[in-house]
Amino acid sequence: MITPPLPAPLTWADPARERAFEHWLLAMAPTHALDVASLRSASSDASFRRYFRVDRAGGHGSCIVMDAPPPQEDVRPFVQVAAMLHGAGLNAPQVLEQDVAHGFLLLSDLGSQLYLDALQASVARGDTARRDTLMRDAIRALIQWQTRADASLLPAYDDALLRRELALFPEWCVGLECGATWNDEARRQWQEACDVLVRSALDQPSVAVHRDYMPRNLMVCESPVQPAGANPGILDFQDAVRGPIGYDLASLLRDAFISWDEEQEIDWAVRYWQAARKAGLPLPDDFGEFWRQIEWIGLQRHLKVLGIFCRLKHRDGKPKYSTDLPRFFAYAHKVAARYNALRPLSRLLEPLMGAQRIDVYS
């Protein structure tokens, strides 16, 4: 039997890996009716992973192929968390086939309409009803994840991990991107701010945390043939942990690629707080205290992301992410300047912001 060749546009740095991929894909093709000649790039991300789309014969939709090269990537957490999401009744890709040793997965396809694109389009049209429907679906799914997923199966978002993430900021953003050097007093202030943020994170109730629950990792999956509650489709969940209950909401409300005015953020946060408490999640009785928790864990995330985006630029040759540094500086500075315990941190940030200093709420 003569097997069809894979499409030429896909490039591989390792010929042996390319041969392994070709053998794996062609072996699966009959079982899943894959038209291997249709294989093309679907997307890539900030990691070493790549995603391809391949059509199914007869016009029966398509599948996604993940290429996650070991040892940089491990597909086992993805497989585990995908099963957890399905167990919680949520819409995530189904793992149809897996080659763990080589880092290849065949997945069901959730389509190509990102939440981010749909939200940006709704803003451009002034369609607040559409925007609110999407965000409320995302909040509903988040509460479902937090109430139904068994967080004990996930690694802990512990003191060590929180501090490793924070350490990315002075190394990659302060030192390499901004070319700044902190004196002893600045390093002391930074350490005190880290202590405050880590302590606040660890004081929050622990639930399953997606860890990157943002519009770019959510898909619009509304269809007459899909069951109620299919929206959103959830992606990029392989780094899930057991950690602070406010983390994923902070990720959703203060995103890398789209910003909302603070009144709107609070409106959605109140809706989450009310529904989550009704669902039995252990949130503070006082919404003001919960909002502080969201802001502080969001600040931890934003400092981490500032470091990661700079690392992507300086280490990994992916400078496009650095264009969003101003948004994250603005998020971080606004929160740090608002609270007495973090005000020294705001003063550390100000010299670094320079021309990047903007107001995301203007």
Image (tube, grey):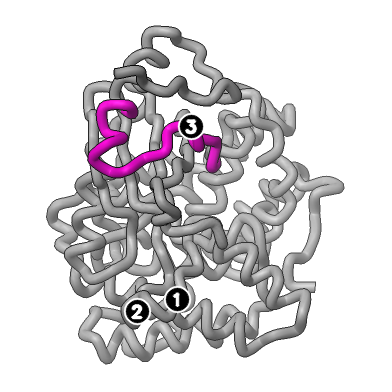
Name which quarter of the figure residue 314 lies in: top right
Q: Is residue 28 magenta?
A: yes
Q: Which residue is mark 2?
A: 229
Q: Nearer the viewer, residue 344 or 100?
A: 100
Q: Which residues are magenta?
A: 25-43
Using the image, determine if residue 200 lies above or below residue 263: above
- What residue appears at the point 43 percent right and 33 percent down from the top-left corner? 36
Relative image position of residue 98 (x, y in whole percent):
23, 35
Numbered label attached to residue 359: none
Q: Nearer the viewer, residue 154 or 293?
A: 154
Q: Earlier in the sequence, mark 1 or mark 3?
A: 3
Q: Which residue is mark 3?
A: 37
- What residue appears at the point 45 percent right and 76 percent down from the top-left corner? 223
Is residue 315 among the parts visible in the rendering?
A: yes
Question: Rounded to the nearest whole Å, what is the CA distance between mark 2 and mark 3?
Answer: 34 Å
Q: Which residue is mark 1?
A: 223
Question: Rounded to the nearest whole Å, what is the CA distance between mark 1 and mark 3?
Answer: 28 Å
Using the image, determine if residue 169 lies above or below residue 340: above
Query: Is there a contact, CB below 8 Å, between mark 1 and mark 3?
Result: no
Question: Rounded to the nearest whole Å, what is the CA distance between mark 1 and mark 2?
Answer: 11 Å
Relative image position of residue 11 (x, y in whole percent):
55, 19
Q: Nearer the viewer, mark 1 or mark 3?
A: 3
- What residue appears at the point 36 percent right and 21 percent down from the top-left corner? 3
